[in-house]
Image (cartoon, helix red, strand yellow):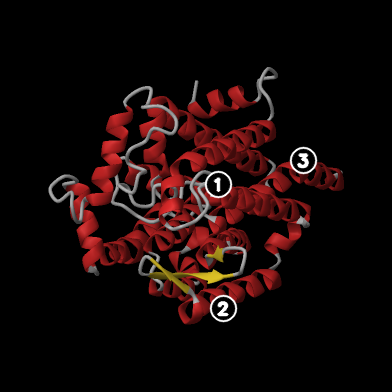
Amino acid sequence: MSFHKITSAFWSSPYLPSARTVLMTSLFLLMSMSLLMMASASVPFAMSKGLSPMYFFYSQMMYIGIGLVAAYVAYRLPLKWYSDFGLLFIAWLSILGMIGLTLLVGAVINGSQRWLNLGLFNFQPAEFAKLIMVLIVADYVVRRSAEVRDTIFASWRLIAWYTPVILLILWQPDYGSVVVIAATAIVILFVSGVPIQHYAALMLALFIPALMYGLFSSEYRRERIMSFWEPFDDIQDTDYQLSRSLIAFGRGEFNGVGYGNSVQKLSHLPEAHTDFILAITGEELGFLGVAFVLALELLILATIMKISHTALKRRQLRLSYMVFGFGVVIFGQILINAGMNMGILPTKGLTLPFYSFGGSSILMALTMIGIILKVDKDSERIYLENKNREY
């Protein structure tokens, strides 16, 4: 029996909850776990800054609340709005304007100028760009499906959409977001039917050279690559973050040292409540805690792909590619964040979706979930309406 038949039989079992139920339950558990770890991991950092011990806990709670409102709004909007060319063009111009504004008046944090101060929180437009660029490429590969399958030159038109966004984000700089945005477009192009030889040419001509240039064009990125290969050869300088992260995992072993008992969060591991919260989870809750978090992330991904596959079977290509693209964005960030925490990948400033501290990331991820749930809700109705029209 093929893998496709096995997975189809698994999801169609009458004894299993629906993909929608699994998705919402996994999200609830993951965000609850996020708040639990935020209450532990962020206290020393907050106190060192003269803030209330629970400052980041309440901030995370506020971000989740705002994100849920955004998800509800996205859920209530008509699906046709997400593929309307005029609206997408306005959203694209808005991205350019917001990213450009960050370069003029944006807050500088850790040497990067990526955030706009909106009063309640700092908003990162690059997160918004991930969502909008998925909508653009999903619409593009459907509108120009024949050309995309025929020749590589049709795919090059996407450069007009992507180049200004990518250049502005690189200027901030935010190389991690660029990798996620570009890789998502390439994956969607591949699954939409771009011939394999054209796909390989596109990778060799654009993506791989750009990736290599980005990795080695600046001193701090070269240092991160060297730290990745030898995480303990300079633990007081270039290897500091990664070595501390690995020490946290090592201390946690299987069961962890106990909730609240982390040593690395005591100003030893920078960004303990943001990029490296998975390491603190590993230290306090051990392998079991990390496995639980990653299992919830994978359940969310599996249900997203299930919803995308269902839309594809109903020949709703635009909806399928859109949901698939959101899944790729989430998967990319899980892979990069978990990989850098565990020393499998070089360190990069990307959050773990629905888990790390960060208003913009939670806002955009939950907005994606709102759109995905809307697709899940309306897909069958659209399918039946179109089927009835045929008869």
Label 1, label 2: how far apart the Cα atoms are: 31 Å
Number of the label disc, if any, that sits on residue 97:
2
- Tell which of 353 and 107 is nearer to you: 107
Query: Taking 45 as reference, is 126 above or below it?
Result: below
Residue flagged by tag 2: what amino acid is it? Gly
Quick one: quadrant of the C terminus? top right
Going from the N terminus, do you reach mark 3 or mark 1 first?
A: 1
What's the residue at 67%, 50% (across, down)?
Answer: 65
Going from the N terminus, do you reach mark 3 or mark 2 first?
A: 2
Within 10 Å of the Cα at label 2, are there few (<14), some (14-19), or many (20+) other Cα atoms?
Answer: some
Q: Residue furthest bottom?
A: 104
Number of the label disc, if any, that sits on residue 376:
none
| Residue picked out by circle 3 | 380
**Residue 289 screen position, x and y as percent:** 44, 29
Label 3, label 2: how far apart the Cα atoms are: 37 Å
**Residue 100 screen position, x and y as percent:** 50, 79
What's the residue at 35%, 56% (across, down)?
Answer: 200
Residue flagged by tag 3: what amino acid is it? Glu
**Residue 363 screen position, x and y as percent:** 61, 55
Number of the label disc, if any, that sits on residue 57:
1
